[in-house]
Image (spheres, rainbow, N blue to C red):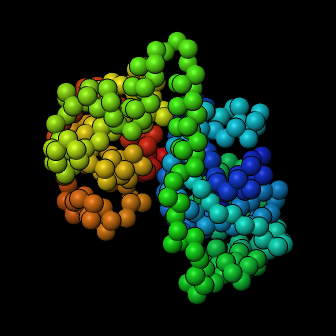
């Protein structure tokens, strides 16, 4: 269990009551923001403290890992300065009966502040340059002692939290996004019915996209399974983020078994252009082993074609759940 602090600023109402946190992936100048990169490290069962209007308003248990999702519509004009697509994690927020004003408790909170990247200043005011920051366990314990016996019990491991054991089976942001894209394709009068069908089937790795990928890939890169009935044509750049050409382009695809497709689509694994298999630090190693991923040594799945390399760069930057090294 890790502990996080989110400074909601203008989006407290939307995020807290919508039960999620959302950030852009990059700054407006396309540079890395270390407090957006932290989103990639959130895992189910982590505790997230919510700070807004000068007070710790409540806490939530993470229900999902981070995933790519469009900027929430409910942000309205507030989010116009941010990129359209960012990182999202679903959080089961609940409000404290009495919000905590750090300015009134810095005698006990102050000694527990992180040495670097603290989400609040020594005077108890929020650090407005920080969106999501990891905080040490002693700091989380002090806040829990001030706020909630329930939270204190969860952190100390005394009280069971159902949230830890029941991560969301579906990612709400992705489901809604893909449904909107399917509707947009269906209503596009410039597309023939056969084109619409091909594009929508490609969402699940079927139809024309599968045929195209089968021309360049013969088996699952990881498990080496080559029976067609056990393989999915997986988009390297996700279907939901691709344009119509990319959705059917063989260079944007790999043939993968269903479990490997899941791991790749969710960013738990990726690949270097050289073929080296990359494993996310937030992935559950025991589960990976059961799904056919070797974790105790370097694995190379073979080189990729030039078009695939371009899409793999996108995947490593925008899907893979690992902080960029220069963040």
Left of 310 or right of it: where is 63?
right
246 sits left or right of 177 in the view: left
Answer yes or no: is residue 156 visible. Answer: no
Asked which quadrant contains residue 216, the reply is top left
Q: Residue at x 29, y 32 (%)?
A: 210
| Residue that sits furthest to the front in the current view | 193
Q: Is residue 244 above or below residue 203?
A: above
* Picture coordinates of residue 29, whole percent (x, y): 58, 30
For residue 140, above or below residue 258: below
Q: Residue at x 77, y 67 (%)?
A: 95
Which residue sits furthest top?
A: 190
Is 226 situated left or right of 17 in this image?
Answer: left
**244 and 282: which one is in front?**
244
Count up the numbered dots: 0
The picture quadrant where one finds residue 60 is: bottom right
Residue 324's quadrant in the figure?
A: top left
Q: Position of residue 273 (x, y in %)?
A: 26, 36
Q: Position of residue 54 (x, y in %)?
A: 82, 59
Q: Is residue 287 above or below residue 10?
A: below
Please name whichever residue, 115 or 251, is drawn nearer the observer in this view of the structure: 251
**Residue at 46% of width from left, 14% of height from top?**
192
- Asked if one can make out residue 182 in the rendered structure from this viewpoint, the answer is yes
Q: Nearer the viewer, residue 184 or 216?
A: 184
Residue 279 lies left or right of residue 302; in this view the side is right
Which residue is pictured at 69% across the width and 67% down the height?
A: 59
Image location (x, y in percent) of residue 310: 33, 28
């Amino acid at each position: 269990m890790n502990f996080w602090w989110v400074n909601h600023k203008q989006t407290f109402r939307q995020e807290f009551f919508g039960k999620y946190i959302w950030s852009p992936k990059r700054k407006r100048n396309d540079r890395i923001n270390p407090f957006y990169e932290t989103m990639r490290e959130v895992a189910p069962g982590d505790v997230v403290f919510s700070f807004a209007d000068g007070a710790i308003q409540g806490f939530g248990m993470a229900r999902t890992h981070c995933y790519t999702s469009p900027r929430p519509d409910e942000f309205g004009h507030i989010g116009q300065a941010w990129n359209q697509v960012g990182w999202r994690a679903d959080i089961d927020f609940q409000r404290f009966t009495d919000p905590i004003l750090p300015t009134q408790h810095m005698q006990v909170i102050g000694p527990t502040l992180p040495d670097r990247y603290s989400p609040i200043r020594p005077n108890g005011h929020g650090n407005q340059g920080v969106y999501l920051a990891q905080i040490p366990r002693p700091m989380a314990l002090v806040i829990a002692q001030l706020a909630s016996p329930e939270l204190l019990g969860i952190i100390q491991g005394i009280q069971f939290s159902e949230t830890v054991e029941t991560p969301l089976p579906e990612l709400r942001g992705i489901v809604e996004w893909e449904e909107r894209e399917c509707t947009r394709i269906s209503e596009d009068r410039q597309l023939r019915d056969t084109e619409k069908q091909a594009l929508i089937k490609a969402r699940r790795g079927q139809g024309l996209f599968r045929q195209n990928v089968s021309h360049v890939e013969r088996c699952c890169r990881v498990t080496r399974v080559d029976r067609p009935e056990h393989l999915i044509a997986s988009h390297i750049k996700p279907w939901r983020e691709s344009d119509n050409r990319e959705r059917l382009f063989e260079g944007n695809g790999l043939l993968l078994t269903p479990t490997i497709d899941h791991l790749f689509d969710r960013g738990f694994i990726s690949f270097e252009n050289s073929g080296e298999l990359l494993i996310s630090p937030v992935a559950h190693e025991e589960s990976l082993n059961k799904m056919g991923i070797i974790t105790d040594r370097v694995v190379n799945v073979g080189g990729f074609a030039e078009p695939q390399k371009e899409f793999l760069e996108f995947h490593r930057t925008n899907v893979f759940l690992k902080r960029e090294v220069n963040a």
